[in-house]
Amino acid sequence: MKQHLRVLNLGAGVQSTAIYLMMCDGEIEPADVAIFADVQDEPQEVYTHLQRLQELSGPEICVVSAGSIGDNLVSGVNATGQRYVSIPTFLQLGDTKGGMGRRQCTSEYKIRPIEKEIRVRMDATGRPLRKDQTVQQVFGLSFDEPRRVERVRAQFLKRSGWSAEFPLFDDMMTRADCLQYLEKRWRHPVPRSACVFCPYHSDDEWMRLKAAGGAEWARIVEIDHAIREETSICTKGMNATQYLHRSCKPIDEVEFKPSADSGQQTFNWSQMDCEGMCGV
């Protein structure tokens, strides 16, 4: 008997929330399960939003986690037990700013935990899918993210039994279209899904978090200092000094400017969500 599993990668941001609500309303074929990979360092508003979605009579929402990425940054051990955690920090070597570090956080804390749960549900841990098994993953990539769609689609073409679906992209819906849809369909604000200390934050976002203060800003400062501690395993083997902000200054000493002055990347991560797929 054939076994098929349809999965929504639920990042709980704008795009995947729109898809989940469309599934609830029958506008998109429902998933068997929506999987949220919890990095344990999202803003509290994301967890509040996720709980509201769980209270709906929609597809099952399963929460998985590879642990706290923030705790692992402090201790210098990542989700796979290696000696460092790689987030896309800004690097400085002497007086020279050297771009950004490797971005492995999405793979280790989003993609792998979701796939692990899928394999458990398919009884395919440690082995390829059988010929009678298929997995279809639904991604919240919108029409303004064609390069991400292309990269994810190319990855799935190499995998027997696995396929990817992009309902927003196929319907030519942009992130702005999703926001308009949510204004009509959902009475609550939908927060942007990303770690509180994500280096891709715009200056507007950093200013908002600093103004709010509390535990989240304290966590940001803690992580920013931890990635430069000489005693931290996280810094060993690194010739460059790491910072959360592009100015290569300690985050609590930065004079933030409007994000429009700082967005120089082709893909504007500062406006997007971390929805559980690799975008680089």
Image (cartoon, rainbow, N blue to C red):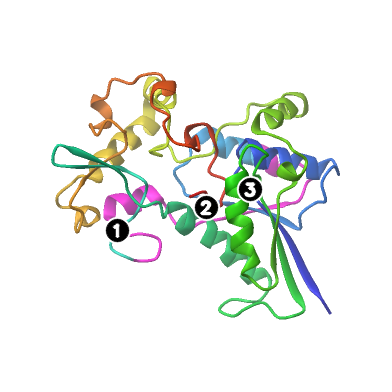
The residue located at (72%, 24%) in the rendering is 183
- x and y, in percent, of residue 142 in the image: 66, 40
Give me the C-alpha separation between circle 1 and circle 3: 27 Å
The residue nearer to you, when weighing 168 against 49, is 168
Mark with earlier residue (2, 1): 1
Foreground mark, 2 or 1, reads 2
Q: Is residue 71 left or right of residue 159?
A: left
The residue where tag 1 is placed is 84
Who is closer to the viewer here, 69 or 147? Answer: 147
**Amino acid bearing label 3:** Leu
| Range drawn in magenta | 52-81
Q: Is residue 75 magenta?
A: yes
Q: Secondary structure at mark 1?
A: loop
Residue 150, can we see it?
A: yes
**Residue picked out by circle 3:** 10
Q: Which mark is residue 224?
A: none
According to the picture, the residue beneath numbered tag 2 turns out to be 278
Q: Is residue 162 left or right of residue 85?
A: right
Amino acid at the residue labelled 2:
Cys
Q: Residue 157 location, x and y as percent? A: 65, 65
Q: Report if residue 78 lies within the magenta region.
A: yes
Q: For the residue labelled by badge 2, is the local secondary structure a helix, a strand or a loop?
A: loop
Q: Is residue 132 left or right of residue 40?
A: right
Q: Report the side of 127 relative to 260 (left or right).
A: right
For the residues labelled 2 and 1, the Cα–Cα distance comes to: 20 Å
Counting residues from the N terminus, which is met first, the one under dot 3 or under dot 2? 3
| Image quadrant assignment for residue 57 | top right
Indicate whether 41 appears above or below 105: above
Q: Would you call the spot at circle 1 few (<14 residues within 10 Å), some (14-19), or many (20 or more)?
A: many
> What is the crowding at mark 2: few (fewer than 14 residues within 10 Å), some, or many (at least 20)?
some
